[in-house]
């Protein structure tokens, strides 16, 4: 095979970015998630390369690196978007419990299904069930611009909480000795430690930003945040708290709780920083998301998706996910039904956690095609809900259900 020209690679990268931008415009007009279109583009590119005898092997580590960077940027962007006020306490509480209970109930239901289906160790089944139960903020957040503000904020909070709680529980389970008293103490203590560290580090980074006078400073902040996230992960801390809380603190520096810190960091300074950070984060997350989902599409063998075993098992899992989400939103939360019930895509976190499962916990009979099927199916379900949202019939359904007073 002839060596591929460097100019051809550069042209391909630029073309992918242009196509991704066009997908974003199409997504706003139609409701079709841009990341779903990127996945399909990656799958199509894989088939074209195979037909031309070109290798499509992608290292899982490459996918994981892009996934981690994308996750950090997307969670930071979400934090910068969230405005905290007293009249939003109920919305945040509802989003937290929605993310928590839907995650836990989905994990238990899927692990029971895998246990009965594969007849392997229940703990291993639970570890596989957790990634499949986490709602992907990486897919949801870029796909909700057309929703009203309350629904948008609910989904941003819910998916962010789902990501963070899912990662915390997953890391705890793979650490072993889950019923050990020391491990339980460390688990709850690490959450509290992460929150305290997040607040201290957020103020330190803000102080640093206001004191740096050179033009190059924001990518330094990104490097610090990524360093803190990676370091926190190595220490088994819920490091996403650091990223999310930093974004929330920056976007809410005007609150009276920070009054005593104004003599070191002024509100106007932080407001200017927030605007610039938001712009840079949006651009960076767009770029990383483009490469991540395209590269992941390159790893998907379309032949796995037409396997009868994959279709039956995948359909059962997606049905459980959709059923549990509908039951919780309809009968327990009693609000945020349409189109929120459809916004349940699995994506970046699911892939990252799946690739992080230690060899000791691997399920020997699990077909990887099930993972691909669930990711694509839940994205299609979200697309259907997004496109259908706003039709009179769906609005009438929402009107029948009491909505909490979050506004």
Image (cartoon, rainbow, N blue to C red):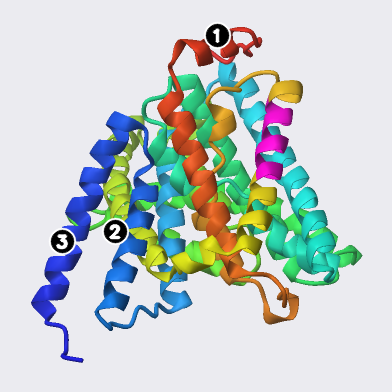
Using the image, tell me which numbered label, if any, was put on residue 136: none
The magenta stretch spans residue 359: no
Q: Is residue 200 among the parts visible in the rendering? A: no
Q: Earlier in the sequence, mark 2 or mark 1?
A: 2
Q: CA distance from mark 3 to mark 1?
A: 44 Å
Task: Name the residue nearer the viewer: 61 or 314.
Answer: 314
Residue 129 seen anywhere in this rendered image of the structure? yes
Residue 111 drawn above or below residue 257:
below
Side of 70 where 87 appears, left or right: right
- Residue 299 position by quadrant: bottom left
Is residue 322 covered in magenta? yes
Secondary element at tag 3: helix
Range shown magenta: 319-329
Of mark 2 and mark 3, the one earlier in the sequence is 3
Q: Which residue appears at 72% of the width and 78% of the height?
A: 364
Q: Residues within 10 Å of mark 2 (few under 14, many from 20)?
A: few
Residue 54 on image: x %, y %: 28, 82
Disc 3 target residue: 14
Binning the other alpha carbons within 10 Å of mark 1 as few (below 14), some (14 to 19) or many (20 upward) gives few
Residue name at image x 84 percent, y 60 percent: 116
Query: Would you name the residue on which mark 2 appears?
Result: 219
Please name the residue that numbered disc 1 is placed on.
396
Q: Mark 2 and mark 3: span between their CA atoms?
A: 22 Å
Left or right of 277 in this view: 172 = right
In the image, residue 81 above or below residue 36: above
Residue sitting nearer the eye, 234 or 249 = 234
Give how far across and how far down residue 353 sits, in percent.
Answer: 60, 64
User: Where is residue 44 shown, x and y percent of the image?
Assistant: 32, 62
């Amino acid at each position: 095979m002839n060596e591929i020209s460097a100019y051809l690679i550069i042209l391909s990268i630029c073309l992918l970015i242009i196509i991704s931008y066009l997908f974003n415009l199409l997504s706003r007009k139609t409701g079709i998630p841009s990341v779903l279109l990127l996945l399909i583009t990656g799958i199509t590119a894989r088939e074209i390369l195979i037909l031309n005898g070109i290798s499509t092997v992608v290292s899982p580590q490459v996918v994981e690196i892009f996934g981690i960077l994308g996750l950090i940027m997307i969670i930071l962007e979400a934090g910068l978007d969230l405005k905290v006020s007293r009249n939003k306490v109920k919305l945040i509480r509802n989003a937290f419990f929605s993310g928590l209970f839907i995650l836990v109930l989905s994990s238990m239901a899927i692990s029971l299904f895998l246990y009965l289906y594969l007849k392997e160790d229940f703990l291993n089944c639970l570890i596989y069930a957790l990634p499949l139960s986490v709602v992907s903020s990486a897919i949801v957040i870029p796909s909700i611009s057309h929703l009203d503000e309350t629904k948008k904020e609910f989904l941003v909070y819910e998916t962010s909480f789902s990501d963070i709680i899912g990662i915390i529980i997953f890391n705890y389970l793979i650490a072993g000795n889950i019923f050990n008293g020391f491990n339980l103490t460390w688990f709850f203590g690490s959450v509290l430690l992460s929150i305290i560290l997040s607040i201290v580090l957020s103020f330190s980074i803000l102080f640093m930003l206001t004191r740096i006078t050179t033009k190059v400073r924001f990518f330094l902040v990104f490097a610090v945040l990524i360093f803190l996230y990676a370091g926190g992960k190595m220490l088994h801390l819920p490091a996403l708290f650091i990223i999310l809380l930093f974004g929330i603190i920056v976007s809410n520096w005007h609150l009276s709780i920070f009054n005593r810190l104004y003599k070191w960091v002024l509100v106007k300074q932080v407001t200017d920083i927030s605007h610039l950070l938001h712009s840079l984060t949006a651009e960076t997350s767009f770029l990383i998301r483009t490469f991540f989902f395209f590269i992941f599409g390159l790893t998907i063998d379309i032949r796995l998706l037409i396997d009868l075993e994959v279709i039956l098992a995948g359909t059962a899992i997606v049905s459980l996910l959709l059923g549990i989400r509908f039951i919780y939103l309809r009968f327990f939360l009693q609000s945020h039904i349409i189109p929120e019930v459809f916004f349940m895509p699995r994506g970046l976190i699911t892939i990252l956690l799946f690739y992080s499962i230690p060899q000791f916990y691997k399920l020997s009979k699990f077909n990887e095609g099930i993972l691909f099927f669930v990711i694509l199916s839940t994205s299609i379900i979200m697309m259907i809900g997004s496109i259908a949202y706003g039709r009179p019939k769906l609005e009438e359904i929402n009107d029948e259900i009491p909505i909490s007073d979050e506004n």
